[in-house]
Amino acid sequence: MSIQSINFDSTYDLIKSGIKASNIRAKTIANNMANVNTKDYKRFNVVFEENLKNENSSALELKRTNPLHFSSTNSEKENISIEQDKSTSMRSDGNNVDLDIEKVNQAANTLKYNALITEINGKFNNLRTVMK
């Protein structure tokens, strides 16, 4: 495996997208928590894992022998979306942010981020070992 081939490794791309989604999710959760007392504020949620599940996994990708060849799938497509939760609120001010839920989401996101970082570090360590 060369340094150039790591850029075209689908696992690497998936981990990179997961880290990007985790960073966006952290900012979104922080924004929700900052607006916990804002009248009529509706919380936002980052959707990534669900988008991956809904993606058509049966699509076949053609093998590329040269990185300059066109890809048969849109590998540049991001599976990250941000959705607003417009559900009604139990609060009288119309805000639907629950601080406890946001803290749980923040903790879960931190665990996912750390797992992704551990995985990418392992890939780089393997590459470093092969290069030695």
Image (tube, rainbow, N blue to C red):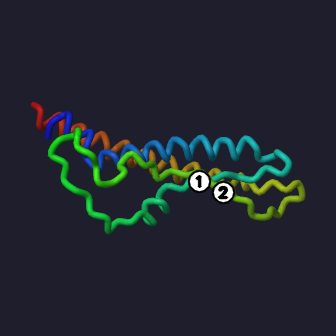
The furthest residue to the right: 92
Q: Which residue does the numbered mark 2 point to in the structure image?
A: 101
Front residue (pair 17, 109)? 17
Residue 26: which quarter of the image?
A: top right
Question: Residues under labels 1 and 2: Cα distance?
Answer: 6 Å
Instruction: Assign a secondary structure to mark 2.
Output: helix
Horizontal side, residue 103 vs residue 107: left or right: right
Quarter of the image for the N terminus: give it. top left
In screen coordinates, is 66 left or right of 95? left
Residue 105's mark? 1
Residue 112 position in % (x across, y down): 45, 51
Q: Which residue of the protein is positioned furthest toward the top in this rendering?
A: 132
x, y (%) of residue 109? 52, 50
Identify whether 88 is placed above or below 120.
Answer: below
Asked whether, in this view, residue 110 is left or right of residue 102, the answer is left
Quarter of the image containing the C terminus? top left
Give, as a three-letter code, the residue at label 2: Ile
Residue at 31% in and 65% down: 59
Left/right placement of residue 44 relative to residue 68 reads right
Labelled pair 1, 2 in contact (Cβ < 8 Å): yes
Say few, some or many: other residues with alpha carbon within 10 Å of mark 1 (under 14 / 14 to 19 / 20 or more).
some
Q: Which mark is residue 9?
A: none
Image x and y of residue 127, in percent = 18, 38
Q: How crowded is the residue under tag 2: few (<14 C-alpha within 10 Å), some, or many (20+)?
A: few
Element carrying mark 1: helix
Residue for point 89% across, 58% down: 92
Residue 78's place in the image compared with 88, above or below, is above
